[in-house]
Image (cartoon, rainbow, N blue to C red):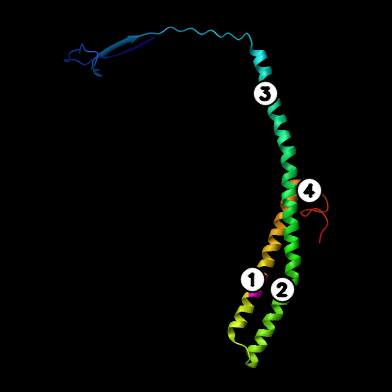
Amino acid sequence: VFASGAYTPDRDFIQSRYIFDPFGHLLIGGAVGAQWNLEWNMASQRAAEKEAEARRLSSLLEWARAGVPAEVNRWHEDVERARADLRQLEETIPVTKEWVVRASADFSVGIGDSREVTDAVAAYVAMKNNQLEAVYRLNTALARLAEATGTLTDGSSFLYPGDPE
């Protein structure tokens, strides 16, 4: 039930349903309501909800069993690729270093030009950059592999799993 009213002297009441006068009105109203809940199958609905949650968790477990080995394989392949790149760079960097020394010696004697020296230095710097990138990729892949296998903070091999090289 509600009631609202306002009166201002020397003001007429407006008899229109489209205009509301806040200084001269009288409003009275009421409402009656009822609520009735029928819950004859609440226990079975809760059981169905728990069964659906169990099915969701079991499908999540199946997905994880399929996904974790794939992730481990991916990071293991990245580790092997980075190690192969490092082995190849260990053979290539001394060759580019010799090229820099020979080009510098030829330029010092006067039988070579400066372009050969700059090309040799650029190749050497590129190989060193590739070596740093391969070390970064190796460390990142080892950390991701440790995370995927669950050995990130386990035992003596704190960060890097497997056989250190």
Which of the two discs, 3 and 1, labels the residue nearer the N terminus? 3
Provide the residue span drawn in magenta.
123-127
Q: Amino acid at mark 3?
A: Ala
Q: Amino acid at mark 2?
A: Ile
Query: Disc 1 designates what residue?
Result: 126
Q: Is residue 11 or residue 91 the one in the foreground?
A: 91
Q: Does residue 32 show up magenta in the picture?
A: no
Query: Disc 4 designates what residue?
Result: 151
Q: Amino acid at mark 1?
A: Ala
Within 10 Å of the Cα at label 2, are there few (<14), some (14-19), or many (20+) other Cα atoms? some
Q: Residue 156: x, y in percent?
A: 83, 53
Q: CA distance from mark 2 to mark 4?
A: 34 Å
Query: Disc 3 designates what residue?
Result: 52
Are the residues flagged by discs 3 and 2 in contact, CB closer than 8 Å? no
As drawn, which residue projects farthest toward the front? 111
Which of the two discs, 4 and 3, labels the residue nearer the N terminus? 3
User: Which callout, 4 or 3, points to the residue nearer the camera?
Assistant: 3
Helix, strand or loop at mark 1: helix
- Image quadrant holding the C terminus, namely bottom right
Q: Is residue 141 or residue 92 the one in the foreground?
A: 92
Query: Disc 2 designates what residue?
Result: 93
Which of the two discs, 3 and 2, labels the residue nearer the N terminus? 3
